[in-house]
Amino acid sequence: MARYVLRRILLALPALFGLVLLTFVLTRVIPGDPAAALAGDSATPAQIAEIREKYGLDRPILEQALVHIRQVLTGDLGRSIFSGRPVTEEIAQRLPATLELTFAALFLATIIGIPLGLVAALNHNGPVDQIVRLLSVGGLAIASFWLALMLQLVFAMDLDILPLRGRVDVDLGLPPTVTGLLTIDSLLAGRFDQFRDAVWHLVLPAVTLCLPGLASIARFTRSGMLEMLQKDFVLYARAAGYGKFRLYAIYVLRNAVTVTVTQIGLLFGALISGAVAVEAIYDWPGLGTYAVQAILTADYKALLAVTLVVGVVYAVVNVLVDVAQALIDPRVAEDVR
Amino acid sequence: MSAVLTRPLLSVENLAVHIRTDGGLARILDDVTLAVPKGGSLGVVGESGCGKSTLLRAILGILPRGATVPKGAVLFEGEDILSDHGASVRGRIGFIPQDPYLSLNPVFRAGDQILEVMRRHAPGRRRDHKEKLVELFRAVQLPDPGGALAKYPHQFSGGQRQRLLIAAALSCEPSLVVADEPTTALDVTTQREILVVLRQLIAERGLSLLFVTHDFGVLATVCDQVAVLYSGRVAETGPTRAVLDTPLHPYARMLLACHPDRATDLLGIPGTVPAATAQPPGCRFHPRCPQLHSGCPIEVPPMLPAGEGRAVACPWYEEAPRG
């Protein structure tokens, strides 16, 4: 098992290195001169050239790339062209907000999606199954910005039971930063009022973000269950006398969710990109809004850093998914030696 | 002897099982009557599609969706067990499935899968269950009985898995063991070993056995009584030796003649088992029977006693075989 985990981690490294290179190249070939953007509308060509030199933008691209790689490896991602602050600092401020949002969405999608898929499969072609099928198509088809507006209208404006936007109520203040996740930090500080506030702010963005994921998790669980229910071991377990709940919700489900778990890893990428729109609408101070701002200002340093961080998070999540899979199915770790 | 003592442990009485399919109503079993006496062993033999597996599933209460039982009863220790889908007999009937590779869940430890059944159906604490299971592993001659508890199914060979499943079948101390061709998926030498272990355990513990197979050789090893099934009906029953030596029903005769050990040259039976949705009227074997009489396609032949505890569903069994 330890060998397997190590192997998954080592396999993730070349992918990350490739990511560093690729993102660098991509941001340098897209149109938009960062030096000109930085210099402002009224800058003279001389001023632009000066800025270009200052940031090393006049060097050969290969050299820029090598410099960039060295900086990345030493944890120095440079300063934002837009704000002049180190991008690592800016990202460190915003990453926890995005992680909290995406984890919350993933959590919701999983704890609702898996039972939904399970119940649908057990009532194959029954009314519950039809509803779940409808939901899973709808969940993928509904545009998140539309859903976000509708939820805001109903729950924040009409019913006024949930906050319209933002992450915290400023009057309550912030808990001391430990993980950066407000729900956890507030609990660690023993501030239940802050915890409640953090959860309240999370609800609408997380619900909006989770829907497509929920839909696909329910669908994959459903089809995984349907496949597993055909297996001989289910019949045998029934004949041997397993209890109904244990048989389906534990014994068979564990086989069925191996596919779902892989899906969750892939979903995480979609969640982070989905977070961009959701964060913008709910005014959530995360990486999504930061990335939008970086794109609009051609702040390529910030953009590189965001891509890199998202890539690292994605890689870490997928290593975790691989480990989870090996924990669920012991054959996984043994097959790859 | 009193009636209670002679009452069989398991009796299947006039059982019919129908399944609704896209092709129409399949009469998988039709008026099947069988009995397994206490301490006795009955082999059910027949070609694929004759209803052997459905019979087992009816007894175990795991009939497929869409199956109905329009007629008949299954009595276990005198109780009708069809009404509650076998719930009351779990643990009292041990089941050995056909395929040891597919019958264990690959993602749970094999030992835990058996312990779960014991937890539900046998009294006692988990620690006692574990001890008992290791004891059973030893009895079925599984290598390293103590270490086997921590292993997953894929870490055992096919023969070892079948030993596990025999141990599982015995884990709740049943009075009846039901086996569905438990050696079909194994190679010949392993088959022999498994059968020897099974026979020995059944004898030692005084258990009854219902054994389903298509293999007469296996039948002779483990069963003292036999029932030949054809297309959902019983063709012939009797003591194994007598039936194997002098089969009376034309179908049984031809089936035995197909067996490579005894055939002078391989004959086979012309035609195929009729589809369950399109059973011929009268005797279901008549389209393939070499001794066809005018009444055969019209009247369903009753079971006729044929001496020595035998019975045959053919009024013409005393006639010399033709062809």
Image (tube, rainbow, N blue to C red):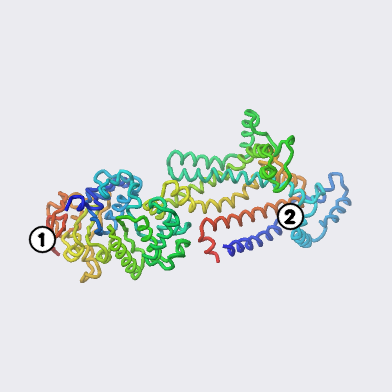
Residue located beneath label 2 in the image: A29
SS for dot 2: helix
Judging from the image, mark 2 belongs to the subunit labelled: A
Residue located beneath label 1 in the image: B319
From the viewer's perspective, is A157 left or right of A44?
A: left
The extreme left residue here reads: B319
Q: Residue A127 falls in which quadrant of the image?
A: top left
Q: Nearer the viewer, mark 1 or mark 2?
A: 1
Does residue B98 appear anywhere in the picture?
Answer: yes
Judging from the image, mark 1 belongs to the subunit labelled: B
Amino acid under label 1?
Answer: Glu
Amino acid under label 2?
Answer: Val
Q: In the image, is residue B148 above or below residue A52?
A: below
Q: In the image, is residue A90 above or below residue B310?
A: above
Residue placed most toward the observer, B49 or B182: B182
Instruction: Tell me if mark 2 has few (under 14), some (14-19) or many (20+) residues whose alpha carbon lies within 10 angstroms of its own.
Output: few
Q: Position of residue A200 (x, y in %)?
A: 65, 37
